[in-house]
Amino acid sequence: MTAPTPTAAMPDGLPDPVPGGPGRPPAAARPQGIRRRWTEHGLTFTAPFLLVYGLFLVWPLLLGVKMSFSDDNITGTGGSFVGLDNYAEALADPDVWSSLWNTVWFTVLSTVPLVVMGMVLALLAHHLRVVSWLWRLSWFAPFLLPSGVVGLLWLWIIYPSDFGFADQLLASAGLHPGIGWLTDARYAMLSIVLTTVWWTVGFNFLLYLAALQAIPQHLYEAADLDGATGRQQLWHITLPMLRRTTGVVVILQLLASLKIFDQVYIMTQGGPDDSTRPILQYVFQQGFTGYRIGYASAVSYIFFALIVLVSLIQLRLARRSREENAA
């Protein structure tokens, strides 16, 4: 009678599931080892990024929080702990609230046209069959320009009173030129909004164009067979399929508009009479003109809390909308 073949034992005393293969780990342990090795290699590859991220983002963020509780001065004096005094002063400062209102007002005025125009231009470019590349380039090219170039372009060419391009258009239409586009408080904010829309609509246009090209063509073919008109296809196919892209565009646009600084600082310096001064410019003035780094840090973190709140509300609304559609 033949004796049974002995089973190879593992170092821990467990039998090897594969005869003749001593030293092999159990099958249940092998995926864990693979995951562990992948984790180790992943940390090795991401370590340089994590180091730079912590050095240039996390550490300044924590240092700013520390400064907001002190009377730090750009001259190097001060630095003593003042608790919540900076935050209390900021909440009672009327200049903070007026600058915050200018920021919110600019966001309201700019977000709607930027979202709507980006979608409309993308729809036109998507269905255009002649020189479509020129149409796409003409709307996306301004987005590639630096903010300084855009601000000076509109400041020196478009908005100069009496001889600027905007006044020439009014004169050619038989209207009265000579409007103080950047010197009249009634028109200054609208002028900055117009500049921003021309400059940044290309980004939203590109996002919508990519989303339109990703819509399955068979949906439109089925609609054609059912006799749906172009307007019906737009309302029942295109716009519902763009809903998720619209949510992303709105979130990105809100965050970008709330952080306005460059074009205002170049074109109006916050004037006239601080009617266009955003909250970030007020932080800049307090920190680098008034030398109050601690107070400027407190104002900036109040604004940061507002941005986080807006983002959370928008994400909550988007999640609720997706749940309702899924139901």
Image: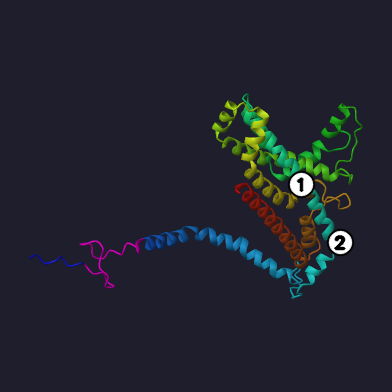
Position of 225 relative to 184 (above/below): above
Q: CA distance from mark 1 to mark 2?
A: 23 Å
Which residue lies at the image location 21% right of the left edge and 62% below the top edge?
19
Where on the picture, by quarter, is residue 5? Answer: bottom left
Q: Residue pushed farthest right?
A: 176
Residue 170, horizontal then vertical, whole percent: 87, 31
Q: Residue at x 74, y 52 (%)?
A: 258
What residue is shown with label 1?
Answer: 263
3 relative position to 247: left or right: left
Point out the residue furthest to the left here. Answer: 1
Is residue 144 visible in the rendered structure shown here? Answer: no
Viewer-proximal residue among 321 and 44: 321
Q: Main secondary structure of the magenta part?
A: loop
Q: Is residue 113 above or below residue 125?
A: below
| Magenta range | 8-30
Whole-percent x, y for residue 242 in the image: 63, 40
* 1 or 2: tag closer to the N-terminus: 2
User: From the viewer's perspective, is the residue at label 1 or at label 2 nearer?
Assistant: 2
Binning the other alpha carbons within 10 Å of mark 2 as few (below 14), some (14 to 19) or many (20 upward) gives: few
Name the residue rendered at 78%, 68% in the picture.
87
